[in-house]
Every structure is written in C-alpha cells, then in structure tokens.
Amino acid sequence: MIIINNKILNRCPVCEHEMIVTNLACNHCRTKIEGEFLPSKFCRLPQEQLEFIEVFLKCRGSIKDVEKELGISYPTVRNRLDNVLQSLGYGVDRTENLPESTDRQKILDALEKGQITLEEATQQIRRAKR
C-alpha cells in the first residue's frame, strides 16, 4: 500500500480561488472515480487552525490543558477556538458572559501589550466586578 502524506490544496496557487477535487482513486483496488467533489470543511482550514484543533482534541476540549500545551492565555485559546468555529461556518457570540476571571485576564493581557494604561485597566476591572 502506498501512503501519501500530501495535503489537498484548497486554493488555486495561481488565482487563489477555491479548488475542487476531480479525481479519486483507491490505493487498494485501484478504482478511479472522476467528477467534481468539494473538500470537507476541515480541508479548507489553514494549517495553524488544523494544528490548534489537533491540540484541542488531544486535550479533550480542556481549555486549561490547551493553555498549558500551547503556552497561551485563556482568552487566546477562546479566540482561536472562535476563529476555527467561524472558519467552519458556525456563528460565534463574542458577547456571551464570560467568567469574571476571564474578563480580568483580558484586561491584564491588554495592559501587558500596552494597549491600555494602568489607569484604564484599573477602571475596567472595577467595572467588571459590578
């Protein structure tokens, strides 16, 4: 049996439009089928998102374990998960109520990145406690 590790191309390298599969072949009996077949939703994901999904599944969906495995914060894991869901065509409600500690972590991450000042972070944390 021949094992091929090439991944299917989902975008044309010339014009960047979506590609279709036109030929399928069985490695066992050599049956070949021609037609127009769309790749699965997962084939269309960029490599970075596929790797994230693999880690997420390996960690059995535990966001804390994904945090540890990838060395990223809870909000970053949630954002990556939301991005994957959006890429797969599912709606994501980014306004849902997150635990207070998550809100605080987002504020601290923004402060660490220099996106907000210490004064702004303090005010936001006080508002989040209400």
Image (cartoon, rainbow, N blue to C red):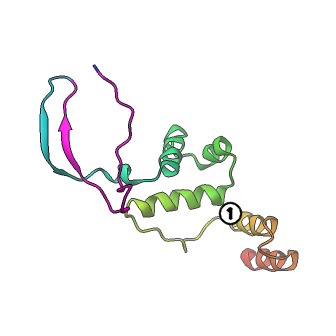
Main secondary-structure element of the magenta-colored stretch:
loop
Residue closest to the far top = 1
Q: For the image shown, how many numbered marks are present on the structure? A: 1
Question: Where does the magenta region start and end?
Answer: 2-27
Question: Is 4 one of the magenta-colored residues?
Answer: yes
**For numbered disc 1, what is the local secondary structure?**
helix
In percent of width and height, residue 107 lies at 75, 69
Q: Give 119 or 115, whichever is nearer the viewer.
A: 115
For disc 1, the marked residue is 102
In percent of width and height, residue 68 lies at 68, 43
Q: Quadrant of the N terminus?
A: top left
Please determine whether, in this image, residue 127 is positioned above or below residue 41. below
Q: Is residue 85 left or right of residue 48?
A: left
Please determine whether, in this image, residue 45 is positioned above or below residue 124. above
Kindly indicate the quadrant of the structure image that contains residue 91. Answer: bottom left
- Give me the residue at 55% from left, 74% from top: 95
